[in-house]
Amino acid sequence: MSISGDSGRSYGPPQPNPYGGPVPAPSHPYAPPPPGGFGPPVPPQPPAPDTGGKGASGWIWAIGGAVATSALWGSLLFATGGFSGEPSPDLAGYTYTSDLCADTSLKPFEDGRYRPSQNPSTSGANPEHSGSQQPSVDSMWCNITLQQDGGSSSDYSSATVYTTAVLHKKSDPAPEFADTYRAYEKQSSPSNHYKVTPVEDLGDEAYLVTREGQDSNTGRYAILAVRHGWTTYQTTWSSYASGRSTNNQPTPEDVGDMLKASTRETLAKLRG
């Protein structure tokens, strides 16, 4: 799972004054003088018919209604940021948590016979979490070291799950999200290469990155990345087993299935 600003903005035409009435048209400096300056006198105009005040009252109500509507529209624009020109972030219902590990689902890994390591040689806490809230992004991390059931104390093997979640509050990550993970396909070497596969029914878009090649004989490496609105989530699996290990490495399909199941359950918790 992007796994962090404001640029200059153009401004639209001036907004109508939400509180004022009609603005009088400016007088033309070269307009002809009003009647009566020179020439024959202009006969007086006949008086307007008496409407009993109803016409004037109608105009007053019309102008008052227009002013009230303009004031209401202006208030709504101010309240929603309509005058600022800054887009409103679509976080798709996800919220910040200071402990992402508490929401990270481990059940799919436990079903695959992996559990948090209790090895006293592990440095630091396990799981280990951190988080940060900034004006532009809220970021969350969780690292969990796992050990496979049935392994002996002499086995040199390890598995780690890294998860990150980012709430993008100032910019939409969509335009560059796919390219970020498609770039792994360009990192291939003679002995290893990466495969990027779209994943259906996860957020707005999701990609599974798997490493294949000689290193897959002794280890597995895979990334599952999801974008849902302006929220991004990434979970990474990294495992290694020495040649002396009695445990079998999970297949790439097994790793992908565990990451997908854990991600679905974790994202559901983050939206709850």
Image (cartoon, grey):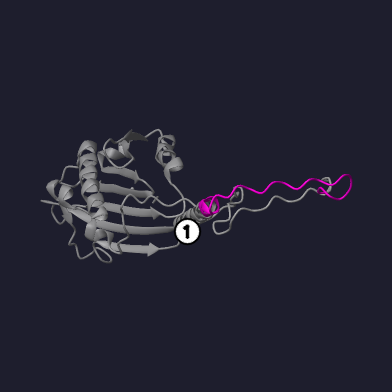
- Disc 1 is placed on an element classified as helix
Q: Nearer the viewer, residue 256 or 39?
A: 39
Q: Is residue 124 above or below residue 82?
A: below
Q: Image check: 173 left or right of 225?
A: right
**Main SS category, magenta section:** loop
Residue 254, image x, y percentages: 19, 39
- Residue tagged 1: 75
Q: Is residue 8 magenta?
A: no
Q: Find the residue positioned furthest to the left.
A: 150
Q: Is residue 53 magenta?
A: yes
Q: Residues within 10 Å of mark 1 (few under 14, many from 20)?
A: some
Residue 116, image x, y percentages: 18, 57
Q: Image check: 110 left or right of 174?
A: left
For badge 1, the amino acid type reads: Ser
Can residue 147 be seen in the rendering of this structure? yes
| Magenta segment | 34-58
Can residue 83 be seen in the rendering of this structure? no
Question: Residue visible at 38% across and 59% down?
Answer: 138
Q: Nearer the viewer, residue 29 or 272?
A: 29
Q: Nearer the viewer, residue 239 or 51?
A: 51
